[in-house]
Amino acid sequence: MATFWFIIDVVFWVGFFILEGFDFGVGTLHSVVGKTEVERRVAVNTIGPFWDGNEVWLIVAGAVIFAAFPLWYATMFSTFYLALVVVLMALMVRGVSFEFRSKRIDPRWVSTWRWSLTVGSALLPLLVGVALGDLLHGLPIDQSHQFTGNFLTLLQPYGLWTGVTLLSLTLLSGATFLAIKTTGVVHDRASTLAPALGWVSTALVIGFVIWTHLAASRGAVPSLIDGVVVLAVVGAAWSSGIGAQGWAFASACAAAGFTVMLIFVNLYPHVMVSTTNAAYSLTVHNTASPPYTLKVMTVVAVIFTPFVLAYQTWNFWVFRSRLASPPVSSETTPKAASGA
Amino acid sequence: MRTDLARWQFATTSIYHFFFVPITIGLSFLVALLQTMWHRSGDHTYRRLTRFFGTLLLINVAVGVVTGLVQEFEFGMNWSAYSAYVGNIFGGPLAMEGLLAFFLESTFLGVWLFGWDRLPRRVHLACIWLVAAATMISAAFIMAANSWMQHPVGYVMNAATHQPQLDDIWALFTNPVFLWGYVHVVLASLVTGAIIMLAVSAWHLRRKDSVDAFRRTATASIVVLIPTMVLTLFVGSELGVVEATYQPMKIAAAEAQWNTCTSCSFSAFQIGGGNNDQTPSKIIEIPSLLSILATNSLHGEVVGLNQLQAQDVAKYGPGNYVPNVFIQYWSMRVMAYFAVLVLVLALWGGWLVHREKLEHSRWFLACAIWAVILPFVLNTAGWMLTENGRQPWIVQGLMKTADGISPSVSTTEIWISLVAFVLVYVALGVADGYLMVRYGRRELSDGTGHAEPPGDASAEEADDLALVY
């Protein structure tokens, strides 16, 4: 039962990195693919109807840990204290910037929310990636499940590599998403960026897969999922290079999802490894809620998850069309308006 | 020190979060109502009003959602001992809230915002009703979790781990504190939404701007406000009786009743009477009213704080079990007195509507504009009463607040996070307040996207899907 809930939680983490992955990427890249305010707005609006629903995957991934593995939740969230403060600030300024950015024509106002969206969207996959890497690499955790290190302890090389890898993958899926959702210059710039990001991601992912093998001491023989991860990212880089944009986006999403899955597959049955003493590690079994709680949660999840998947899919279907840049007449750039 | 700081942080972030939550719940319901009127009457004015108040709703949802994230994370960050101890019970409703409410709310809000003129009208209308329903479902789960802290039910103590363990999930949702508290919160949110709609409409009516349109929203908000305010007062009073049963300290402290009494008089205004002062100067007293409020009977007995303290020491061991009496006494009164003020305003408005001279009474319109402050005072006072009154417990009778904090988090770390959150919250508050005033005062557009104020990049009315945000 505890293992079942571990799988459910992994599903939410994977879903989060696939879905919010591309909108993080678009958020970071919107300043790169858009040179004028209208182009930037087009880029932002490609994720307009989706980003908020995508973010709930992260909230639920966290809440599932709270309900199903309270001891894991307690140790993890207090361990990453300062990092989570930064994560929360990034989530906040990024979250409001969508709604606020075009509510006022003033160059400073617009550029404030432009930067909060860009920086927030880049920091989030990086920091969450570092945290996930830390879970697997291990942290100094004592007998009573308390973290004994400090903020710098969290920034160990494997964690950082994981963070950078996930950041790069979100940029890749963001660029490929922009390529299938836009036309004109935004589309062209995104299509040019995608293969470059693809090959950078490939290098990072290969390094990540090897390092993960070492970190989890799994020996030299690659597992099936290692192969799938590398295949997906190479596929994304290659298909974006030949202009198969739909395939590129699908492979980029798969690469992001399988990378996250790889972390958890290697982590199981642990949920947080202790470097102090292997016996102090948190596992699926020593942190799980009692069976009754898990049973209740199972009933709720089995009934309601299909609905969530159905209406989120419907959302993507409704807004499946490409966004064309609007005609020049409705252009409202800050520059033009500040003269008025 | 660490506990105090962590409490300050939780109080600051949750009070701030709850500025936006009731606006979201109340306004989404009212916007759904406006859109329904458009749908049924075909009158274009209702469509313009829907979009106008929809924009105000969206600005608030943005801040409400992101400040809610902090609440969700804070349990594990600052209160890890608490989370580990009761997570198997308390975490359940939170996870259900995410799965049942957050997905629904955020997905359909996105579809609604981007779906104007793209979805069939019925489907589009259904979207805003789903958003309104989701906000109320969300409130139900978080109130069930909070009520469990006030009156823990549905658990057994595990003999081996000495930990409470969930054994009846239904008990959480039939908890009397939850039932009364939830209804009270939803009603208070409707009051908040209605007052905001009334205040914005009054501002425009005073300027004779789109009188025909804003008379409708002013009237609609008064029609919603009168019954909801009456019900909020009634349900709040009943909630007090329920809480007096399970948390007698909370209610005794709210009355600053130090010693047991029968036919107790109600202190309407007093000077002094904090935790170090058991003999305040009572300025206004109403005979027997306290007994009626607390027990629904004229001669009912109300047990005093000193007697309750002695009982708790006998039950739980040495310690101070009396919450901050000054905060309790005044948050109760601020809430009750201002609520009556809102009711008076609403009845005044109702009378003016009846006489068909709402838009001509400049006095009423001026009062209605300034009344926009009241719901925030009321809501904050209500939560101070509830949460401060639970102290020193984090879960009534099960775990003390001081035992719930994270052992591994240092004072410095809490300082850093407290300062960081306050800075971001001030910035967001300024930006949100600015936009609310700006968009609240904006002229009502003709709904075609061509009547924005000069230089306004508002995209709510944009025809183009690429320019919504």
Image (cartoon, rainbow, N blue to C red):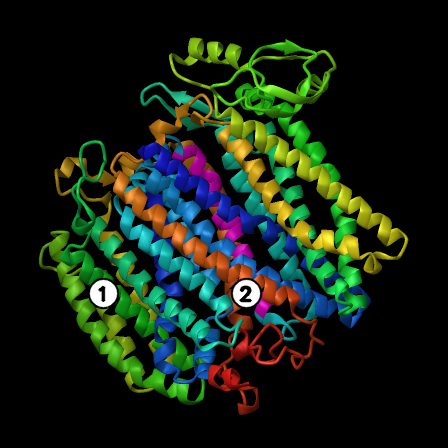
If the image is split into quadrants, where does the C terminus of chain A sit? bottom right
Residue named by callout 1: A164
Q: Report the predominant secondary structure element of the magenta stretch.
A: helix
B233 to A79, vertically: above or below: above
User: Could you tell me which secondary element the residue under label 2 belongs to?
Assistant: helix
Asked if the residue at tag 1 contacts the one at tag 2, i.e. Cβ–Cβ closer than 8 Å, the answer is no
Q: Is residue A248 visible?
A: yes
Q: Residue B119 placed where, x, y %?
A: 64, 72
- Which region shows up in magenta? B87-113
Question: In the image, what residue occupies the spot 64% across and 56% down?
Answer: B28
Numbered circle sitting on residue A122: none
Q: Toward the viewer: B152 or B34? A: B34
Q: Residue A41 placed where, x, y %?
A: 47, 78
Could you tell me which chain the residue with mark 2 belongs to? B
If the image is split into quadrants, where does the N terminus of chain A sit? top left
Could you tell me which chain the residue with mark 1 belongs to? A
Q: Is residue B123 visible?
A: no
Q: Which picture quadrant has residue B129?
A: bottom right
User: Could you tell me which secondary element the residue under label 1 belongs to?
Assistant: helix
Horizontal side of A1 relative to A37 (left or right) equals left
Q: Toward the viewer: A71 or A320? A: A71
Query: How crowded is the residue under tag 2: few (<14 C-alpha within 10 Å), some, or many (20+)?
Result: many
Q: Which picture quadrant has residue B331?
A: top right
Numbered circle sitting on residue B110: 2
Residue reaching furthest left?
A220
At label 2, the amino acid type is Gly
